[in-house]
Image (cartoon, helix red, strand yellow):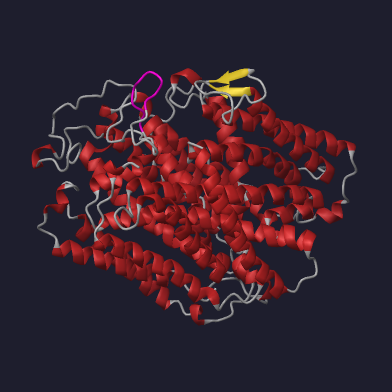
Amino acid sequence: MGLDIRIPLGMIFLIIGGIMSAFGFYSRHSSLYDRSLGVNLNMTWGLIMFVFGLVMYVVGKRQKWQDDPVTPRPWERTGSKHGH
Amino acid sequence: MNLTHAANLTLIDWLIMLVYFAFVLGIGFALKRYMRTSNDFFLAGRSIPAWVCGLAFISANLGAQEVIGMGASGAKYGIITSHFYWIGAVPAMCFVGIFMMPFYYGSKARSVPEYLRMRFDEKTRALNAVSFAVMTVFSSGISMYAMALLIQTLGLFHGIIPDQYIFHLSIVLSALIVLGYIFLGGLTSAIYNEVLQFFLIVAGFAPLVWIGLRNVGGWDGIKHTLPVSMTHSWRGMAHASTNSLGVEWVGLAMGLGFVLSFGYWCTDFLVIQRAMVADSEVSARRVPLIAAIPKMFFPFLVILPGLIAVSVTSNMAGAGSGAGNQTSMTRPAGSAPVPLDEAHPHGIIPEKIDPISGHAVLSTDGTPVYNYDLAIPVMLLHYFPTGILGLGLTALLASFMSGMAGNVTAFNTVWTYDIYQAYINKKGTDAHYLWMGRMATIGGIVLSIGAAYAATSFNNIMDALQLIFSMVNAPLFATFLLGMFWKRTTGHGAFAGLVSGTGAALLHHGLSLPADATPGIHGAWIHLVHTYPSDMAQNFWTAIFAFTVNMVVTAVVSMATEARPESELVGLVYSLTPKPVETHLEWWQKPATLAIAVLVMLVALNLVFA
């Protein structure tokens, strides 16, 4: 199929991770984090998600086949083994 | 309404949820232009890589039943609940990948009922297609209902819209979103969203488990706090009376581990559809095996929070009124934790509140009843500050939507190919069937809404689902097992077996009752003959009866009727089909190697938590 799932997956993690870490940085001295045992979950987990998103996005972009509008069906591929 | 647990959401939480919903619909829009034929819409063009299908395979199953039901069972019964994942899923997933997928994928059937038509006959397909369609609508409706109820209980929209409309608005909103992305992008859209949901569920629950474990002193802390029976998965399984499930190991292994689990994972089109769209037969065989790996570790994400929720005691941070002080946040080293002396500790699990009167529900002896279904939601509210709370709630909503979408895509395919094309309009153009698929999506969602309102009369989601599974799925596996591995099985035999298997399930349910239940929906609606120690024991034995009756009747009727010529069964029956060619694969690329690795991991996990 024409769209590599890693691109939207990477993007959503970049955005949500970005929002969370920015908010975590902004609220780093707040009493908000008493609830999570003093751990700034927004910043730490947000950053982890951001990095994961970045990796997914970069890997997804490097695949070239996603620009191919018509992916041949297995039985339409003549003699070639599958692979993307 | 139980507003003592109302979520205190800020703008940032709403923003995160909004981003998720924008992506869900955005994927549908992005894929719309690839939906050229019915093949694209229903089968994703059979072009999806194995790992994507694998994650969709478990995500489609990760609906309300999983997250809420498993968290609740974890809180109620303990780590023993992980049997639903370990012996209750993984062996069956290995079996379907290694032995059954070559027939599903290789026969080019477009659905499981269509395979039944190829192998047996038209009536067997019709029976399976209709019962399956009804079941998907119910499952999707129950997911929808559970989601609306949760949104109402957590008071997500409290203060934004009047309380009495929250339930209805939640139903309509979830229906519109799922409808939107399936209508636009078909199965591909559902699969892509399921992958997104998989990663969001992991991202939302992993930090919850981590912070929860830190709070209760890790797994050792849980073991010290909770009764021994809750932290061991195999202890006390020799007798039904010595473990919290009320099932002995025979019932567990046969009922759950064999009949129910193989009946679900090996024959249910909802999951099989995800493997059928893989880009090659080898990929299709790998799909359930890839899915089995995260599946094995899901107990740590969905059952463990339940155990943590009942382990949190009042001297810990945040328990009771708001945040605790620094010194009590983690257990001081060396101090012996005090075990709870009750048989069923409840930790932070809230009491059940009557939604109409607003008062606490009391059991017959006057003690409070705890609402275990809220184990995971309460954990989210307990540990997550605003921001990551939005992520946690997104994960929860994602799980509900993936459960719904999985059922809707399976429904629209079975309706269009196995009911509409087979019996109503055989000569339509491909464009017409594509249009019908979109209409069936709307129809499926409308029926789900009906089922969601019908589900308001059931108190327990798990009970209702298990009941449906036992009746429909349990006898089914016998039909496939005989059909795929015994060439003598005939269409008449399969049909007679299926009907009598479901009949046996109904009869058994009508004659038996779990202890402490009243006759009615829980059983004994014909006459009370036998009482089981628990509803799970009843479910498992219902399944065992259904399976056995189906097997015997199918075999007997098959012997009495004429078998099909062997030439017609090539590619459909094990003994008449050439083994899959694997010479181009290295030993470590072969599906069998992956299956063995998965099973070794499974045994190791069981030993660790025995």
Expressed as whole percent of the image width and height from the top left, the position of residue B512 reads 61, 23
> Is residue B164 or residue B29 the one in the foreground?
B164
Q: Which residues are magenta?
A: B362-370
Image quadrant in which you'd find residue A82: bottom right
Q: Is residue B188 left or right of residue A38?
A: right
Quarter holding the C terminus of chain B is top left
- Is B368 inside the magenta-drawn segment? yes
Image quadrant in which you'd find residue B16: bottom left
> Is residue B600 or residue A74 the one in the foreground?
A74
**Residue B366 shows in the view:** yes
- Is B527 inside the magenta-drawn segment? no
Residue at image location 80% in from the left, 70% down from the top: B427
Residue at image location 38% in from the left, 48% down from the top: B152
Quarter holding the N terminus of chain B is top left
Q: Is residue B549 left or right of residue B315?
A: right
Expressed as whole percent of the image width and height from the top left, the position of residue B168 reads 45, 53
Q: Is residue A65 left or right of residue B77?
A: right
Q: Is residue B555 above or below residue B238?
A: below
Expressed as whole percent of the image width and height from the top left, the position of residue A56 reads 37, 69
Residue at image location 49% in from the left, 74% down from the top: B29
Q: Is residue B342 above or below residue B600?
A: above
